[in-house]
Image (cartoon, helix red, strand yellow):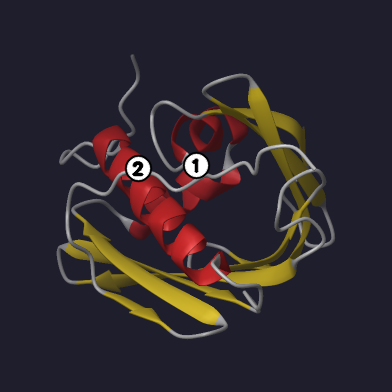
Amino acid sequence: MGPSISLIGCCRKSQAMIADDAAVEVRRRFRVAPEKVFAAFAEARWLARWLSPSPDIKLTLLQFDFREGGAYRFAYHVPGGQIMTVRGTYRSINRPSKIVFSWVIEPPDEHAGLESDVTVTITPLGEVTELFIRHERLTRPGAGVRHTEGWRGALEQLAALLEPSGHLHVD
């Protein structure tokens, strides 16, 4: 077996997080409307720009069918030429407040075959929107830490993408 692929990104800001043996929870508040946060998950053009653990890891959307029962498949291009692939199915979509999907890592990754579940909850709180992510069934050793760091890094990139004006930032 070759070297393991790690997607642990760097974390620059502290975020509220709870970790146990099988689940991680990450929260982040944004000064944008809930619809803008939802769009960052629902629209391929935005998702591809932020859903990776660090700017050094590029995401390619191989498949993206954002609807209940729809499937996705993402390739993460890790520095050094490695590729980590994830696939899943959108189980529930309640616009603009909740998204539930499976998360399955494909070979040759060390966590290949681990099927976990992600629940995204988007809640308006006055002038801010809270994004709460619960990633469950992370039962392999190291999976909780790996996914906590991955979500933290991704939310850093999402924060850079969302402008205080409530509009998605376009280069």
* Above-or-below relation of 67 to 170: below
Residue at image position (53%, 48%) is: 41
Check residue 51 in the rendering and tell me which mark sits there, or answer none.
1
Residue 130 visible to an observer of this rendering: no
Q: Position of residue 100 (x, y in %)?
A: 64, 69
Q: Amino acid at mark 1?
A: Leu
Say left or right for 93 vs 80: right
Q: Amino acid at mark 2?
A: Leu
Which residue occupies the foreground of this view, 97 or 131?
Answer: 131
Give how far apart the Cα atoms at labels 2 and 1 are: 8 Å
Q: Is disc 1 placed on a helix, strand or loop?
A: loop
Neighbor class of circle 2 (other Cα within 10 Å; few <14, some 14-19, many 20+) is many
Residue 78 visible to an observer of this rendering: yes
The answer to whether the residues at label 2 and label 1 have Cβ atoms under 8 Å apart is yes
Q: Is disc 2 placed on a helix, strand or loop?
A: helix
Classify residue 165 by image quadrant.
top left
* Above-or-below relation of 2 to 115: above
Q: Position of residue 121 (x, y in %)?
A: 46, 72
Which residue occupies the foreground of this view, 6 or 100?
Answer: 6
The residue to which callout 2 is attached is 158
Residue at image position (49%, 45%) is: 39
